Image (tube, rainbow, N blue to C red):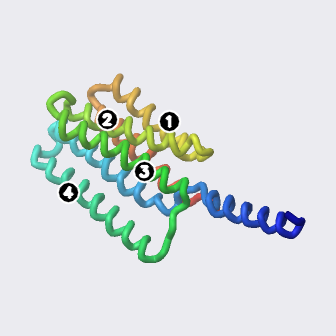
Amino acid sequence: MNSSEAREHLEMAERIVAASTRELSLRYAAPFFIAWGLASGTVCLIFQLIERGLVPATATWASGGLLAAAVIFSIVYARRKARCGAGLTFLQREFLNVLWIAMGVAFVSNAGGWNIFPTFGLSAIYTIAASIVLFYIGLHENRRALLGGIVLLASLVVANFMPSVVGYVLAAGFYLGYAGFGVAELMARE
């Protein structure tokens, strides 16, 4: 191999590395984190308000509506981005795969274990799943995700010692830790 061929191979390797690591942020996926953080936090808030007698028990339907809206938003947004040709890096795809796996396991726990876990126990499962996603992203040098994961776990610990306001505390964790991470990703410089 002569020097010009070696230089071409090095340039090609540099382009491959640059393409695979061009964006360690999750700006593309930030709206997912915002939507799901707001929906999850509001569901916790609704159940806390029901438990305190501040809204009727029929408000549980609103939580189902919020979750359905988050699902619809996720589908529409992902399809729109795919049509626009907004490609994901390998690392971004891995982040989203961990997100879907963690949330899928939480959903199965919710659907299959609702007799085992009382209302806020289910919220705690989602808090743990969301923090796993953020910690995984944080392991890839994203400090905003690491901070969001810490906020989510802190909300779980605080909620454990404040049984009369568990829903409020877990809601704050989702608003600040999960949706806050999404907002921080949108605002981050490239």
Residue 97 tag number: 3
- The CA distance from mark 1 to mark 4 is 29 Å
Q: Residue furthest front?
A: 1
Which secondary structure, mark 4?
A: helix
Image depth: mark 4 or mark 3 in front: 3
Q: Earlier in the sequence, mark 2 or mark 4?
A: 4
Q: Position of residue 104 (x, y in %)?
A: 31, 45
Q: Position of residue 52 (x, y in %)?
A: 19, 36
Q: Quadrant of the C terminus?
A: bottom right
- The CA distance from mark 2 to mark 4 is 20 Å
Q: Earlier in the sequence, mark 2 or mark 3?
A: 3
Please give the residue where the numbered disc 2 appears in the rendered image: 125
Q: Position of residue 172 (x, y in %)?
A: 39, 42
Please give the residue where the numbered disc 4 appears in the rendered image: 65
Q: Quadrant of the N terminus?
A: bottom right
Q: Earlier in the sequence, mark 1 or mark 4?
A: 4
Image depth: mark 1 or mark 2 in front: 2
- The CA distance from mark 4 to mark 3 is 25 Å
Please give the residue where the numbered disc 1 appears in the rendered image: 150
Q: Is 81 situated above or below 98?
A: below
Under mark 1, the amino acid is: Ile
Is residue 133 shown left or right of residue 58? right
